[in-house]
Image (tube, helix red, strand yellow):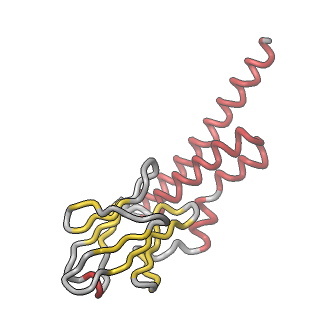
Amino acid sequence: MEFKVEHPSLASEDVVIRTSLLTSTKVIVNGMPLKGKFGGKYEVPTAGTPVNLQVVAVMWDPVPSLKINGEKYLLQPPLPWYGYAICSMPLLLLFIGGAIGAMFGMAGLIGNITLARSSFSLPVKAAGIFASTTAAVVAWLVGAVAIQVLVNAL
């Protein structure tokens, strides 16, 4: 996912935040990746004084928030509480399926929140969240049955 930073102190620069589930968050300034410091801190060169930018990861959410010169800046508004509740439905596998259920439930949760924060239309998001939750349950059932068959075969 890519997010353009529209902040007054960065108006002279083209700043993009690129996130991914498999790699770390990258800050791109005028098409070039910016090298960060420890803790997700960056110094963005501007025409005037450099701007301090910090990428703050939000648990379970693929969209980070930023601190620009100490001021909090949201790339997107947060999901409403019911959005997080609906996206968290696969976590019910934790109570039903133990460790295996937790593994598939976490995968479903991350997939659902990524879908909910995407730019797809609401019907596509709803269908995707339903499909992702169903896939987590089916994967848990297949995994649990496979383990049961393997254990009984020994």
Quadrant of the rendered image containing residue 7: bottom left
Identify the residue at horizontal 46%, vertical 77% (top origin).
Answer: 77
Quadrant of the rendered image containing residue 71: bottom left
x and y percent of residue 151 in the render?
78, 19
Identify the residue at horizontal 65%, vertical 30% (top origin).
Answer: 142
Q: Vertical placement of 52 versus 148: above or below?
A: below
x and y percent of residue 116 in the render?
48, 62
Between 92 and 9, the residue placed more toward the observer is 9
Q: Quadrant of the N terminus?
A: bottom left
Between 81 and 47, the residue placed more toward the observer is 47
Identify the residue at horizontal 30%, vertical 74% (top origin).
Answer: 44
Identify the residue at horizontal 47%, vertical 57% (top origin).
Answer: 114
Instruction: Give the left or right position of residue 69, taking residue 85 as reference.
Output: left
x and y percent of residue 45 in the render?
25, 76
Count of numbered circles in the view: 0
Instruction: Give the left or right position of residue 121, taking residue 147 as reference.
Output: left
Instruction: Give the left or right position of residue 135, taking residue 18 as reference.
Output: right
Instruction: Give the left or right position of residue 64, taking residue 47 as reference.
Output: right
Between 70 and 37, the residue placed more toward the observer is 37
x and y percent of residue 80 in the render?
56, 74
Quadrant of the rendered image containing residue 35: bottom left
Q: Vertical placement of 48 versus 145: above or below?
A: below
Q: Quadrant of the C terminus?
A: top right
